[in-house]
């Protein structure tokens, strides 16, 4: 918290931001301004809501501090920047960016809000370092609606692959190094993103669809058609990295791609050793690299799923109940900071104190439990609990009366 202290103009918002981050790390079953304010010992949620809505501080500046913090403590010369989106299911139509759209969180089309994240993945750990909210055309085509949600009047529609290079550029322009970028088919199928990475000399291993067209010496072919021509001897059994149940072994092969531009390009193919299912990756590297390196980068993409899971489960990344853009960016930035703290503590503990026999290394989940229990646990008396019960019931009564009044005034 000392690293971001200078981003706040007054002592009170700075202290409240610290209490909010502690609340995000707490064991509350549901984390929002109401529950965190009660947990922090405040009389009402007004202060927490003010911090997210009207207090003067720059969430993008805090994001930059977070990025520096992660890059410093999880530094890895062969780090991979992983880009991916995640959705938060929402009700109503007033929350910024919300519409009916597909989200992997629900596995179907839902009323949801989608954001693209950039995750720094190295050997010491992984954490999100940037975020961009996806604003659909249903919002950018309605300037009044966008401005009511706090978006800039000149906000233009941008696809998810167009949001990715913004974050990658910010990371690299801040004098941080990453040798590789990884992403799924949404990003691998976008030629502009691939061209932007090649222009910077940044390697990538981006998933593509089976019908993705590849240029070889024999001309253009689909990725799945090329896979059928690979001889048996070309496949190698390699691990894509350790998972929850051990090493993730697959069969791998790659094909050199024709190009007159500088650098080296490949089609990387992964085969499931049980089902035979194939996955395809478009790859680029400024210098020649072995197959094992491409496999390592491809395997790093799973880190983003682990980041989303722990960020949501441990730091309330998806539990915000805010409507305006500024409030969203402030909440997710502080949630990313809370999760990054756990990732850095985990990395440092693994370095200083390797796990003893019959014990797995400390996990982010266990560090969160120990930290809140031993360091930051808040204990409140009965009077505090009763005051909050009274406040909630009074607020809910006002809301109920307001709903009834609107319902009565509506035309039949």
Image: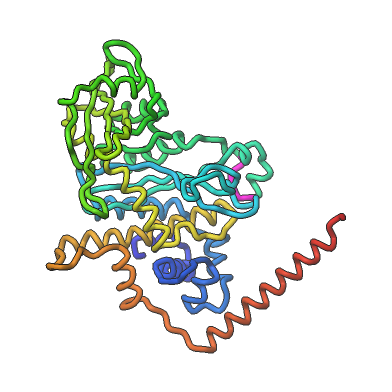
Residue 151 shown left or right of residue 360 in the figure? right
Q: Classify 183 as above or below 21.
A: above
Location of the C terminus by quadrant is bottom right
Residue 308 visible to the viewer = yes
Seen from the viewer's position, the closer of residues 248 and 10 is: 248
Question: Which residue lies most toward the front here?
Answer: 275
Q: Residue at x 27, y 34 (%)?
A: 271
How many marks are shown on the rendered structure?
0
Could you tell me residue 120's position as x and y percent? Answer: 31, 47
Q: Residue at x 63, y 82 (%)?
A: 390
Magenta stretch secondary structure, dominant: loop
Q: List x then y, in percent, for residue 295.
A: 23, 37
Q: Is residue 248 magenta?
A: no
Q: Nearer the viewer, residue 210 or 56?
A: 210
Residue at the far left: name it: 357
Note whether 73 is above or below 158 in the view shown.
Answer: below
Q: Is residue 84 left or right of residue 120?
A: right
Q: Quadrant of residue 409?
A: bottom right
Residue 327 picture location, percent across and down: 54, 56
Asked if residue 11 can be seen in this view, the reply is no
The quarter of the picture where residue 388 lies is bottom right
Residue segment shown in magenta: 149-153
Looking at the image, which residue sits at the far right?
412
Q: Position of residue 32 (x, y in %)?
A: 52, 66
């Amino acid at each position: 918290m000392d690293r971001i202290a200078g981003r706040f103009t007054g002592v009170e918002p700075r202290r409240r931001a610290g209490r909010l981050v502690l609340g995000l790390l707490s064991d509350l079953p549901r984390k929002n301004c109401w529950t965190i304010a009660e947990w922090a010992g405040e009389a009402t949620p007004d202060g927490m809501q003010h911090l997210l809505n009207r207090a003067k501080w720059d969430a993008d500046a805090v994001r930059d501090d977070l990025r520096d913090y992660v890059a410093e403590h999880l530094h890895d010369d062969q780090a991979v920047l992983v880009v991916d989106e995640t959705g938060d299911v929402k009700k109503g139509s007033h929350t910024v960016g919300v519409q009916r759209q597909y989200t992997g969180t629900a596995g179907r089309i839902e009323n949801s809000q989608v954001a693209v994240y950039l995750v720094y993945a190295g050997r010491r750990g992984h954490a999100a370092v940037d975020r961009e909210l996806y604003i659909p055309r249903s919002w950018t085509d309605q300037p009044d609606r966008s401005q009511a949600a706090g978006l800039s009047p000149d906000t233009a529609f941008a696809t998810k692959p167009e949001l990715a290079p913004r974050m990658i550029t910010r990371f690299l322009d801040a004098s941080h190094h990453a040798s590789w970028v990884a992403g799924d088919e949404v990003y691998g199928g976008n030629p502009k993103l691939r061209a932007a990475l090649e222009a910077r000399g940044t390697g990538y291993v981006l998933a593509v669809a089976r019908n993705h067209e590849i240029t070889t010496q024999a001309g253009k072919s689909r990725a799945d058609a090329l896979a059928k021509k690979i001889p048996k001897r070309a496949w190698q059994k390699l691990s894509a990295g350790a998972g929850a149940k051990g090493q993730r072994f697959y069969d791998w092969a790659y094909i050199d791609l024709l190009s007159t531009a500088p650098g080296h390009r490949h089609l990387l193919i992964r085969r499931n050793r049980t089902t035979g299912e194939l996955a395809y990756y478009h790859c680029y590297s400024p210098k020649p690299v072995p197959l094992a390196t491409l496999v390592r980068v491809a395997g790093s993409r799973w880190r983003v799923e682990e980041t989303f899971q722990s960020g949501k489960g441990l730091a309330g990344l998806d539990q915000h109940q805010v409507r305006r853009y500024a409030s969203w960016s402030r909440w997710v930035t502080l949630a990313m900071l809370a999760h990054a703290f756990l990732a850095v503590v985990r990395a440092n503990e693994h370095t200083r104190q390797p796990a003893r026999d019959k014990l797995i290394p400390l996990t982010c989940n266990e560090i969160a439990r120990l930290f809140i229990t031993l360091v930051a646990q808040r204990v409140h008396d009965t009077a505090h609990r009763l005051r909050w019960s009274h406040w909630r019931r009074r607020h809910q009564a006002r809301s109920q009366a307001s709903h009834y009044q609107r319902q009565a005034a509506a035309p039949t």
